[in-house]
Image (cartoon, grey):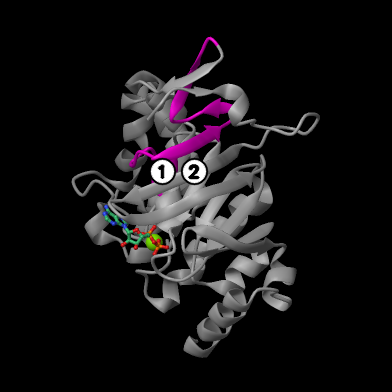
Amino acid sequence: MDTKDVSDFPLAIEGDPAPMVSFRKVTKSYGNLTVLDALDLDVAEGEMVTIIGPSGSGKTTVLRMLMTLETINGGVIYVDGKPLTHMERGGKLVPANDRHLRQIRSKIGMCFQHFNLFPHMTALENCMEGPVHVLGLTKQDARERSEELLAMVGMADKRDQHPSRLSGGQQQRVAIARALAMRPKVMLFDEVTSALDPEVIGEVTNVIRTLVSEHNLTMLMVTHQMGFARDISDRICFFYGGRIEEQGAPDELFGNPQRERTQQFLSAVKEAH
Ligand SMILES: Nc1ncnc2c1ncn2[C@@H]1O[C@H](COP(=O)(O)OP(=O)(O)O)[C@@H](O)[C@H]1O
Ligand SMILES: [Mg+2]
């Protein structure tokens, strides 16, 4: 990654508030395969954006790069007004060091398809771990925060259970509480209902609904549940080949898609259900 001029990657149009998350001409490739192709994507503070699109179109890659699980090959990612992958040094953007990455990463929480709870810890201990060991909260403060969040996701009565004693839906709700216990500004959800039995999907989507309606979190979600996405999103981005093929308000994108690829994808998804 090279040094770049800050002015080549303007964060915001003058006069507009800066977005919470911003991809500027971000390129990611593996060998010859370009997975993200000069991607521009903004998410405003408090906005819920859902990414849909065919398998392999780069949806997960977008989230993994926000978690700095991947390095990028070109462009800049901004989170909360600061470059994620770069630091500003005298008007230049230079590649970020570990300390900078940790600081920015602490603003982002993520839930995956597989919940990855710590198996040897109870639900409550899972939620307390990060606040105590990463944020430096006292056990008492971490416990209060975690109990409140477990109550919010409807898991207060299971707080002393280990993950192996919980259903998939219950584990996923604990995983959401655990991510929120770090007080992220941005939450990422990657197919969080895909590994669940159909009858427990609703308990997880209801938690996400509550977050949308009652909290001012910025959220970026990948899902195959089109009805859910249409209900709760402010905007839908349809990904194809590492680019945004089409985006818009849910009713526009689902009700009146303009691009042929979007139309084809949506009708294929409809037939599969
Ligand atoms: N570590 C990797 N090495 C090589 N190719 C990868 C790697 N991770 C992802 N890819 C490829 O990048 C493309 C996009 O992957 P991904 O973002 O996971 O797609 P989606 O989530 O939309 O299904 C796919 O073609 C995938 O095979
Ligand atoms: Mg994926």
Residue contact at pointers 2 and 1, CB within 8 angstroms: yes
Residue 181 quadrant: top left
> Residue at the bottom extreme?
271
Within 8 Å of ligand 1, the CB of disc 1? no
Crowding at mark 2 (Cα within 10 Å: few <14, some 14-19, many 20+): many
| Residue type for callout 2 | Val
Name the residue located 64 percent from the left edge and 30 percent from the top edge: 10
Q: Position of residue 14 (x, y in %)?
A: 77, 29
Residue where numbered disc 1 is placed: 65
Q: Residues within 10 Å of mark 1 (few under 14, many from 20)?
A: some
Dot 2: element: strand
* Mark pair 2, 1: CA separation: 10 Å
Q: Tag 1, which secondary structure?
A: helix
Quarter of the rendering containing residue 127: top left
Indicate which disc, 2 or 1, sits on the residue closer to the N terminus.
Answer: 2
Q: Please tell me whether residue 144 is drawn above or below residue 193 in the rendered image.
A: above
- Write down the residue under mark 2: 26
